[in-house]
């Protein structure tokens, strides 16, 4: 018998379940990357919507009257002012651009709370497909303002509001789907890698938008709109919501101990000890840990057939019921401030680089992608550390603690030259996006499968929506505050971001204390 080719050997070395998981991992990765790809153009186009027209008149003029006459004659040449695109060519352009960000993010924050509740009552594939098609429509709608020569501020604001609402269909859907397919084992690392779709989408969105920004900025929105719409069709054709739908195992095959974090192992050990020594009582604090082990242990390798009756038969959790899950409120409030920092960079970083480094909109957009490159490594690092330490809150707290002084260094060092800016973009991206990535993925999935839910998998969408919806409130406030504060100086914007990082850390202190206490009790138990 002839030896099998290496490629076939590689394919057959993985099971059917593993191939399906790899496919869902890749598919949801690119589905949500397209969401971020369609959000990024507004930050790139800002430098084109308002240009520093005074910089193009550096020649010596004999008098102010001559200068004013020259400017007036230039403005009469076309509807679009040489200072930008009306109505963003005025001196209050930062406030107007901030209003665009705020309208999108405020709609996104409000819609997110409703999206999770609606999403868990509808098939994910249909819900996500409709949301992606609508997102493509409203993203392209903003760009049509260029081709139709529209200069009404409310047209752009309404396009942003509509886009913000329909984009809320994305996150609860993909997190629920990925949570259904992957168990708790190494979830931090797996979801840290998976969550790099955020940065990949931002990078691709920046490059696509920057390609057309200086020549035809309308295409900077139309092309991302077409891409996310096409991905919506791909979603409809290929997305599998749950492994039970095709009779796959519920979680990757492994021993159940592989899926327990240190705190959970300690609780199991304490239970075993109590069976032997009834005089010792179990520590009550162990009942409030974020990640349960019992539900994970009983759910390994469960093969079900056909319709997945158990999944659809459970009732959806209420909004208040989800808030009662230990850790949801704390992580939600932490994410509010962490996402405030992240989205301020997302929407204002290219304009900041344009002002500080004096680059054009295209080069500033290209350079801003380094922040997202750092974010990829930060998300993976946060997931890896949280898996090794088995402490989600402590990992987030450590990165938030380092992020605040790093932001101060960024505001200082970035003025020293392009090379310094590149280094600080990478470091800041890792520390700012690390906690944000961990909370919105692994932590949300952990809380959405908490033991208090008694195996109700349909609650994951609501829990995810609550956490990300609260974070989106901060995402709406950050760019708005940046637009209001930046006229007084960019340093004040960075001070605001440092305060926000401190507030995010403050809301995690209680959970960090519980994790450290649990670790101390675990160490004491091992000594005995």
Image (tube, helix red, strand yellow):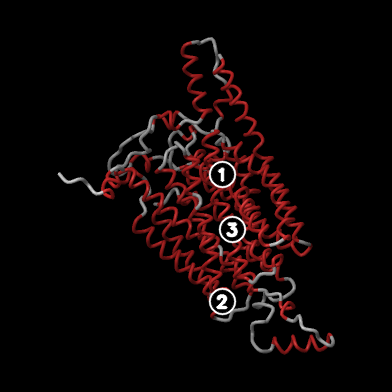
Q: Secondary structure at mark 2?
A: helix
Residue 133, picture quadrant: bottom left
Say whether marks 1 and 3 touch (CB < 8 Å): no
Disc 3 and disc 2: Cα gap in Å?
30 Å
65 displayed left or right of 523? right
> Up-down: is 134 above or below 423?
below
Residue topped by disc 2: 145
Q: Which of the image's four quarters has the C terminus? A: top right
Residue 186, x across and y down, in percent: 46, 38
Point out the frontmost of discs 3 and 2.
Answer: 3
Residue topped by disc 1: 439
> Up-down: is 135 above or below 378?
below
Q: Residue at x 43, y 28 (%)?
A: 257
Total number of numbered discs in the rendering = 3
Q: Residue at x 51, y 23 (%)?
A: 267
Q: Earlier in the sequence, mark 1 or mark 2?
A: 2
Q: Which of the image's four quarters has the N terminus? A: top left
The circle on residue 333 is none
Residue 401 vs residue 286, the one in the foreground: 401
Asked if one can make out residue 461 in the rendered structure from this viewpoint, the answer is yes
Disc 1 and disc 3: Cα gap in Å?
22 Å
Point out the frontmost of discs 1 and 2.
Answer: 1
Q: Earlier in the sequence, mark 1 or mark 3?
A: 3
Q: Dot 2, how many residues are within 10 Å of its Cα: few (below 14), some (14-19), or many (20+)?
A: some
519 displayed left or right of 179? right
Residue 306, x across and y down, in percent: 28, 43
Say whether marks 3 and 2 touch (CB < 8 Å): no
Residue topped by disc 3: 370
> Up-down: is 141 above or below 480?
below
């Amino acid at each position: 018998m002839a030896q099998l080719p290496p490629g076939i050997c590689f394919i057959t070395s993985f099971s059917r379940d593993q191939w399906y998981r790899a496919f869902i991992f890749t598919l949801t990765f690119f589905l949500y990357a397209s969401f971020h790809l369609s959000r990024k153009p507004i930050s790139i186009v800002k430098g084109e919507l308002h240009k520093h027209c005074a910089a193009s008149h550096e020649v010596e003029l004999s008098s102010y009257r001559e200068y004013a006459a020259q400017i007036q004659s230039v403005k009469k040449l076309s509807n679009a002012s040489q200072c930008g695109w009306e109505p963003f060519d005025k001196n209050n352009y930062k406030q107007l651009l901030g209003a665009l960000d705020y309208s999108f993010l405020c709609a996104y924050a409000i819609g997110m709370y409703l999206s999770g509740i609606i999403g868990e009552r509808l098939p994910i594939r249909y819900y996500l497909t409709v949301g992606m098609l609508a997102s493509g429509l409203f993203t392209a709608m903003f760009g049509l303002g260029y081709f139709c020569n529209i200069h009404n501020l409310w047209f752009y604001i309404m396009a942003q509001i509509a886009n913000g609402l329909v984009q809320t269909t994305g996150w609860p859907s993909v997190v629920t789907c990925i949570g259904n397919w992957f168990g708790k084992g190494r979830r931090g690392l797996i979801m840290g890698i998976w969550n790099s779709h955020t940065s990949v989408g931002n990078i691709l969105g920046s490059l696509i938008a920057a390609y057309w920004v200086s020549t035809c900025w309308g295409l900077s929105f139309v092309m991302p709109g077409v891409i996310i719409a096409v991905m919506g069709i791909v979603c409809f054709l290929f997305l599998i919501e749950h492994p039970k739908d095709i009779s796959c195992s519920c979680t990757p095959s492994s021993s159940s101990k592989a899926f327990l974090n240190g705190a959970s192992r300690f609780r199991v050990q304490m239970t075993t000890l109590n069976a032997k020594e009834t005089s010792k009582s179990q520590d009550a604090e162990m009942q409030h840990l974020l990640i349960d082990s019992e539900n994970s242990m009983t759910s390994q390798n469960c093969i079900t057939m056909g319709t997945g009756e158990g999944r659809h038969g459970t009732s959806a959790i209420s909004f208040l019921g989800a808030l009662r899950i230990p850790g949801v409120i704390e992580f939600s409030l932490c994410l509010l401030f962490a996402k405030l920092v992240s989205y301020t960079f997302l929407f204002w970083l290219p304009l900041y680089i344009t002002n500080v480094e004096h680059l054009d909109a295209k080069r500033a957009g290209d350079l801003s992608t380094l922040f997202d490159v750092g974010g990829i490594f930060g998300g993976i690092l946060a997931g890896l550390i949280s898996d090794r330490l088995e402490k989600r809150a402590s990992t987030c707290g450590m990165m938030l603690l380092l992020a605040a002084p790093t932001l101060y260094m960024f505001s200082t060092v970035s003025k020293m030259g392009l090379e310094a800016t590149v280094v600080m973009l990478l470091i800041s991206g890792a520390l700012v996006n690390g906690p944000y990535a961990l909370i919105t993925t692994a932590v949300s999935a952990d809380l959405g499968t908490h033991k208090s839910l008694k195996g109700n998998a349909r609650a994951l969408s609501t829990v995810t929506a609550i956490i990300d919806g609260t974070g989106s409130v901060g995402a709406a406030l950050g760019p708005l505050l940046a637009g209001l504060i930046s006229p007084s100086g960019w340093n004040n914007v960075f001070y605001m971001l440092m305060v926000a990082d401190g507030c995010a850390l403050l809301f995690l202190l209680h959970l960090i204390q519980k994790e450290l206490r649990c670790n101390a009790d675990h160490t004491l138990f091992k000594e005995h």
